[in-house]
Image (cartoon, helix red, strand yellow):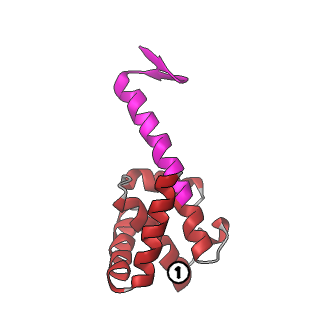
Amino acid sequence: MLTHGGFRGTRQNILIKLNLIMKKELFDKYVKAVATQFHFTVEEMFVQSKRRDLVDARQILYYLCMERPIRISYICRFLKEYNYDVGHSTIIHGYKEAKKLVESDPDYKDFIDKTTQDADAH
């Protein structure tokens, strides 16, 4: 049994936990960036609503995460921490819808580029 930075377990388990922590930090950066861009609080972004502006914001978040790549199971897990429970199919659908937006609207493309650069810089 190995120990590393407070983690115990096999080397593979330790690497999985470290990966999860890194992806969570990135996910949280994306959440804040998207909420700011759409003029929401983080809490507002995860209200159970189908309001178009909220849906667009969440779909852009899914796009950022999937392009990184962050596993869909991780995205589901991280969303639950914000009390927002959705399934894999919702994330996949949202990703595809956001991809269409990014490919057709240069403002969305610019936002995606800026957000990923900012996340890489920190």
Please tell me in which quadrant of the rendered image residue 116 appears.
bottom left
Number of marks in the image? Answer: 1
- Residue 13's place in the image compared with 62, above or below, is above
The answer to whether one can see residue 31 in this image is yes
Residue 19 included in the magenta stretch of the image: yes
- Residue 90's place in the image compared with 9, above or below, is below
| Most foreground residue, 74 or 65 | 65
Residue 97 included in the magenta stretch of the image: no
Prevailing SS of the magenta stretch: helix
* Residue type of the residue flagged with mark 1: Lys
Please tell me in which quadrant of the rendered image residue 16 appears.
top left
The answer to whether one can see residue 47 in this image is no
| Most foreground residue, 65 or 120 | 120
- Residue 52's place in the image compared with 89, above or below, is below
Going 45% across and 83% down the picture, which residue do you hit? 107
* Image side of residue 114 versus residue 81, left or right: left
Q: Position of residue 41 (x, y in %)?
A: 67, 70
- Residue 67's place in the image compared with 18, above or below, is below
Going 43% across and 16% down the picture, which residue do you hit? 2
User: Where is mark 1, residue-wise?
Assistant: 50
* Image side of residue 39 versus residue 24, left or right: right
Going 42% across and 28% down the picture, which residue do you hit? 14
Quarter holding the N terminus is: top left
State the residue lying farthest toward the top.
1
Determine whether the residue tagged by mark 1 lies in a helix, strand or loop: loop
Q: Position of residue 51 (x, y in %)?
A: 55, 84
Extent of the magenta region: 1-29
Specify few, some or many for label 1: CA neighbours under 10 Å numbering under 14, 14-19, or 20 or more.
few
Q: Position of residue 108 (x, y in %)?
A: 44, 79
Going 51% across and 48% down the picture, which residue do you hit? 24
Q: Position of residue 28 (x, y in %)?
A: 56, 55
Please tell me in which quadrant of the rendered image residue 84 appears.
bottom right
